Amino acid sequence: MQGHAVGIQLAFWLAAAGVAVSLVFVMALPKKPA
């Protein structure tokens, strides 16, 4: 059961990190001169 919970937590943190990284990338990209 603990392994299952760890898997869910890992997936959640992976998704959260992906969203955060993409948000930062999208927000920082237009500020750079093309």
Image: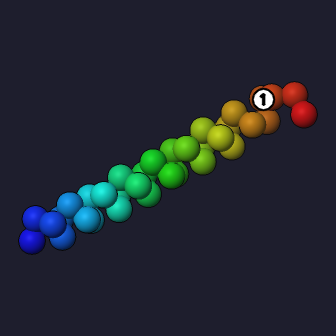
Q: The residue under label 1 is which amino acid type?
A: Lys
Quarter the N terminus occupies: bottom left
Asked where in the image residue 6 lies, by quadrant, the reply is bottom left
Relative to 34, say whether 2 is above or below. below
| Residue 3, x across and y down, in percent | 15, 66
Which residue is pictured at 44% across the width and 57% down the height?
Answer: 15
Residue toward you, 28 or 4: 4
Which residue is pictured at 78% across the width and 29% down the height?
Answer: 31
Q: State the scheme by which the image is colored.
A: rainbow
Callout 1 crowding tier (Cα within 10 Å): few <14, some 14–19, many ≥20: few
Residue sitting at the far front: 3
| Residue 29, x across and y down, in percent | 75, 37
Quarter the C terminus occupies: top right
Residue underneath mark 1: 31
Which residue is pictured at 68% across the width and 43% down the height?
Answer: 26
Secondary element at image label 1: helix
Is 11 on the left or on the right of 28, as rendered?
A: left
Is 23 on the left or on the right of 30, as rendered?
A: left
